[in-house]
Amino acid sequence: MKIFAAALTAAALLATPALAAPCRDAKGKFIKCPEKAAPAATRCKAANGKFAKCGTPGAKPIK
């Protein structure tokens, strides 16, 4: 039982640094992680030229 507890503790300690700071520069120094860009929202217009939900009939996506 003591061996199992020691193995579990060792595994937890080895896995922690990998999750702590994944962002490093080319020299191995820790840097601030870049923000992830949000995906661009698709907008749609109805046949009358007004904005509408993209799921409605007759709505076409605009660029």
Image (cartoon, grey):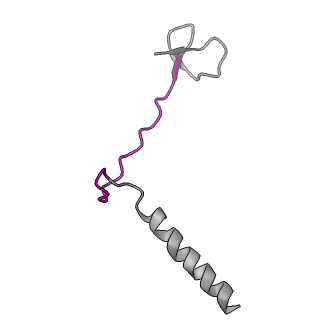
Q: Is residue 51 above or below residue 2?
A: above
Identify which residue, 24 or 51, lies in the foreground. 24
Q: Position of residue 59 (x, y in %)?
A: 60, 14
Q: Residue at x 45, y 68 (%)?
A: 17
**The quarter of the displayed image where residue 48 is located:** top right
Q: Position of residue 57 (x, y in %)?
A: 67, 14
Q: Furthest-top residue in view?
A: 47
Q: Residue at x 47, y 33 (%)?
A: 39
Identify which residue, 43 or 29, lies in the foreground. 29
Identify which residue, 34 or 30, lies in the foreground. 30
Q: Is residue 17 above or below residue 28?
A: below
The number of discs equals 0
**The quarter of the displayed image where residue 9 is located:** bottom right
Q: Quadrant of the N terminus?
A: bottom right
Q: Is residue 48 left or right of residue 55?
A: left
What range is drawn magenta here? Answer: 25-44
